Amino acid sequence: MKARLDQHAPLVFETRELGRRPGALKRLSRSVAAPKDLGIEVIGVPEGAPVEIELRLESVMEGVLVTGTTRAPLAGECVRCLEPLQRELVAEFQEMFSYPEGDRRGHQAEPGDDEEEETFLLEDDLFDLEPVLRDAVVLALPLQPVCQEDCPGLCSTCGVRLADDPDHHHDAVDIRWAALQGLAGTVQDGEKDNVHGAESGVDEKQEK
């Protein structure tokens, strides 16, 4: 059985003042502590960090249309050089929270309706913003965060951070030339063996 919403939870909001009157509006602001795992592996909002939320609630025929903006600090690491980085995230979102007796399109859900699109419902004039907030934050995150656009990353040979040592390099022989050099050495060794063999043959003839 699904747990009932807790009206005192930081990301649960009430809409009772709208009174199901289409066109009725309500604006509110709230600062909450970021829930756990608000982000992706390489960057996200640290747990407990302040998340500022601005909401506009509008009563419509089928439910309450929630439009909002959130601001939060980000922490992560550069995917090129692995240095820690910090950013500020600003994400916008809009979602319909429907009255329980109807779906998001304002009519009773019928068998065969497309059920792939997630439907958010009001519960006793309350709604939980957390899933909508998570989606908005993740969609606004950089998938490949970098400390700077031209970050050169790490040396593939020794792992040193190239931005700290622009002249860093290693003297390396092209593997193709190394192979040719090895082949040349083998040929030279073979030639030497042939020369020594020929000289030995001449010596033997002279002795006879």
Image (cartoon, rainbow, N blue to C red):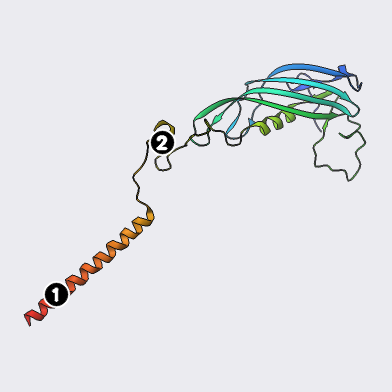
- Foreground of the two, 179 or 72: 179
Along the viewing direction, whichever of 18 and 88 lies nearer the viewer: 88
Figure quadrant of residue 41: top right
Q: Which residue is denoted by mark 1 in the rendering?
A: 200
Q: Mark 2 points at which residue?
A: 160
Q: In this view, does 43 lie to the left or right of 186?
A: right
Residue 161 in view:
no
Lateral position of residue 145 relative to residue 59, left or right = left
Q: Quadrant of the C terminus?
A: bottom left
| Quarter of the image where one finds residue 16 | top right
Residue at (66%, 31%) from the top-left corner?
140
Q: Residue at x 38, y 56 (%)?
A: 176
Residue 49 as seen in the image, left or right of residue 103:
left
Kindly give the residue lying farthest to the left in the view shown: 207
Q: Position of residue 115 (x, y in %)?
A: 83, 42
Q: Residues within 10 Å of mark 2 (few under 14, many from 20)?
A: some
Mark number displayed over residue 92? none
Looking at the rendered structure, the secondary structure element under dot 2 is loop
How far apart marks 1 and 2 lie (CA) works out to: 56 Å
Q: Where is residue 141 in the image (x, y as percent from the top left)?
A: 63, 32
* CB atoms of marks 1 and 2 within 8 Å: no
**Rendered residue at 14%/74% (across/down):** 200
Q: Position of residue 102 (x, y in %)?
A: 90, 33
| Observer able to see residue 126 | yes
* Place of residue 121 in the rendered image (x, y in percent of width and height, measured from the top left): 84, 30
Q: What residue type is labelled 1?
A: Ser
Q: What element carries label 1?
A: helix
Q: Which of marks 1 and 2 is nearer the N terminus?
A: 2
Q: Against 201, is 109 above or below?
A: above
Q: Which residue type carries mark 2?
A: Val
